[in-house]
Amino acid sequence: MSQLKTQPTNASVQEFLNALERPDQQADSAVLLRMMGVATGDSPKMWGPSIIGFGQFRYRYASGRTGEWFQVGFSPRKRAFSIYLSGGLNRHEAALTKLGKYTRGKSCLYIKRLSDVDLNILDAMIQKACSLTEDDMLT
């Protein structure tokens, strides 16, 4: 079985964030660091070269494939922040109707800037993703 490409690294989260060219991305990243750190009670860790993850859980697919992933995380991409919530976005349908301006994938929100969304709603979504148990992650 192939191994997941994105793995935790020992790279510095702060050095990664300091290298961001846009001050607004640095400021929004500081807000996300605080929100996700409080929600998980964990320190941020780099996953691969550009994702900052918090917490960790083990997952298993129906196929039997297993792996480790972070509970919540984000990546300040050039066009938008990618915000990752464990358990998928389907658990957040009610909150998404009130969140604000975003696009989405299966487990990922794409938000151009945090001022486009209601931070209280986003924080509640992060908290909910962090409250899931490993049994909730076994799909």
Image (cartoon, rainbow, N blue to C red):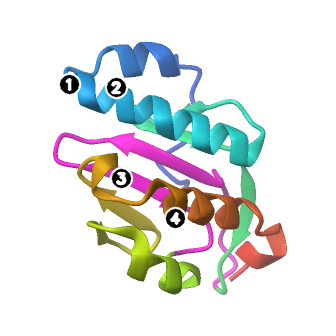
Nearer to us in this view, 72 or 120: 120
Task: Identify the mark nearer the N-term, 1 or 3.
Answer: 1
Res. 71 image quadrant: bottom right
Could you say whether the residue bearing mark 2 is in a helix, strand or loop?
A: helix
Rendered position, 80 above or below 45: below
- Left or right, residue 26 beside residue 131: left
Residue 118 screen position, x and y as percent:
42, 60
Rendered position, 36 above or below 20: below
Amino acid type, callout 3: Ser
Q: CA distance from mark 3 to mark 4?
A: 16 Å
Q: Residue furthest left?
A: 79
Q: CA distance from mark 2 to mark 3?
A: 14 Å
Inspect the magenta stretch and tell me whether residue 14 lies in it: no
Amino acid type, callout 4: Ile
Q: Which labelled disc corresponds to residue 26? A: 2
Task: Identify the mark nearer the N-term, 2 or 3.
Answer: 2
Amino acid type, callout 1: Arg
Please say if the residues under marks 1 and 2 sit with CB atoms less than 8 Å apart.
yes
